[in-house]
């Protein structure tokens, strides 16, 4: 299945692995590893600002074609020449597509072999552990991918009836001012439509090495990677401790919601009666979800090819699973 925005969390795991190996630090300037990035007002941007959507680059002024998106050297030059849209470090604003290109370049610069996100993830994490998860799917595997479908109007109405908060989310992403930052961010790749046409069903788009929304896997493979992560099989407890708290907790200037972020992850307070720790992970429109708990050492994921109208706690199916999981853990004394 297409896992959409939780893809960003897997890129964050790759960065955490490089941190654990001493190849970079979260508070490093990006320019320490990528000197050409330090121009046009981007000189003081840190690794963690990029991961926390604080780089001031929620969209690019340069139109990105399909051909450009497949050329990491060309995208490197585009990113180097861009000017921040808001002052870096002075707010968090969802970098819907730019996050993937920025983090890919950081990984290429910090990795001693200069691998991109797809190769790094495969060689360091998924292949050694037999996990079927891909950022940039090999074309020979296209027949295995379930097609994503949008929820019907009736399904959306039912979801809104259960939780009116979904109406605000739908309005925010479907009825937006074309001159707003969110419209510019969502429209940076006009040939990628994640709202209506679901062009990501195209095998050609699924092969893109873009660590923003284009990864292929299932709930088991997603949870398996983060089970390794949270249990010290990918990074040390010292590195895990670095990511247990968010970097920023304020109103996102792109999507106009209060969001806690840091190190490439989202942070949520407990939602159910049995939870006692921050939920860390990454949500997505359509209800694709990935979460982990550093205290209980568990990870869990929910993905569906029949996409829903909500996200995280506005996704009924997912929240029932999360609450039930924690009720079971509590009953077992865990």
Image (spheres, rainbow, N blue to C red):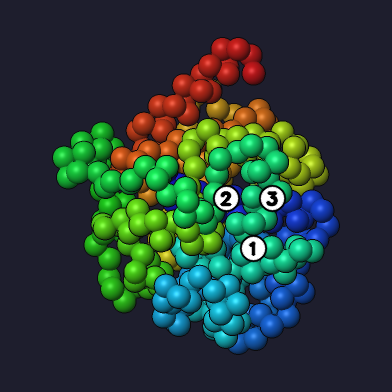
Instruction: Residue at 41%, 61% (x, y): give it.
Output: 204
Is label 1 in a helix, a strand or a loop? loop
Residue 322 image offset from top left, x and y in percent: 47, 29
Q: In this view, does 164 lie to the left or right of 303?
A: left
Counting from the top left corner in percent of width and height, residue 236 is at 79, 42
Q: Is tag 2's residue or tag 1's residue first in the polypeptide sequence? A: 2
Tell me how far mark 3 sits from mark 2, CA to CA: 17 Å
Q: Nearer the viewer, residue 129 or 325?
A: 129
Per the image, the residue denoted by label 3 is 123
In this rendered view, identify the residue nearer to me: 75 or 318. 75
Q: Which of marks 3 and 1 is nearer the N terminus?
A: 1
Q: Residue 5: x percent and y percent?
A: 47, 52
Label of residue 9 in the image = 2
Marks 2 and 1, how far apart at CA: 16 Å
Circle 3 SS class:
helix
Q: Residues within 10 Å of mark 2 (few under 14, many from 20)?
A: many
């Amino acid at each position: 299945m297409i896992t959409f925005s939780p893809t960003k969390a897997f890129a964050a795991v790759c960065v955490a692995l490089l941190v654990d190996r001493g190849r970079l630090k979260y508070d490093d300037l990006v320019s320490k590893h990528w000197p050409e990035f330090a121009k046009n007002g981007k000189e003081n941007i840190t690794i963690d600002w990029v991961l926390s959507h604080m780089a001031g680059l929620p969209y690019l002024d340069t139109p990105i074609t399909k051909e450009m998106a497949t050329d990491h050297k060309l995208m490197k030059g585009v990113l180097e020449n861009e000017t921040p849209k808001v002052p870096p470090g002075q707010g968090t604003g969802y970098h819907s597509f730019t996050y993937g290109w920025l983090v890919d370049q950081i990984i290429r610069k910090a990795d001693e072999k200069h691998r991109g996100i797809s190769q790094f993830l495969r060689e360091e994490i998924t292949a050694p552990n037999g996990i079927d998860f891909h950022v940039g799917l090999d074309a020979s595997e296209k027949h295995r991918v379930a097609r994503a479908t949008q929820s019907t109007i009736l399904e959306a109405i039912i979801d809104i009836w259960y939780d009116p908060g979904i109406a605000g989310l739908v309005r925010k992403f479907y009825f937006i001012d074309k001159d707003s930052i969110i419209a510019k961010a969502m429209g940076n790749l006009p040939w990628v439509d994640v709202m209506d046409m679901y062009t990501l069903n195209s095998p050609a788009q699924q092969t893109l090495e873009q660590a923003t929304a284009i990864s292929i896997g299932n709930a088991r493979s997603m949870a398996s990677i983060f089970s390794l992560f949270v249990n010290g099989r990918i990074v040390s407890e010292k590195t895990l401790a670095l990511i247990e708290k968010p970097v920023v907790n304020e109103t996102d200037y792109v999507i106009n919601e209060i969001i806690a972020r840091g190190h490439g992850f989202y942070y949520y307070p407990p939602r159910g009666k049995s939870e006692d720790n921050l939920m860390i992970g990454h949500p997505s429109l359509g209800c694709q979800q990935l979460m982990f708990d550093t205290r209980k050492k568990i990870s869990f994921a929910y993905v569906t090819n029949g996409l829903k109208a909500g996200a995280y706690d506005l996704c009924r199916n997912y929240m029932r699973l999360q609450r039930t999981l924690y009720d079971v853990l509590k009953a077992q004394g865990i």
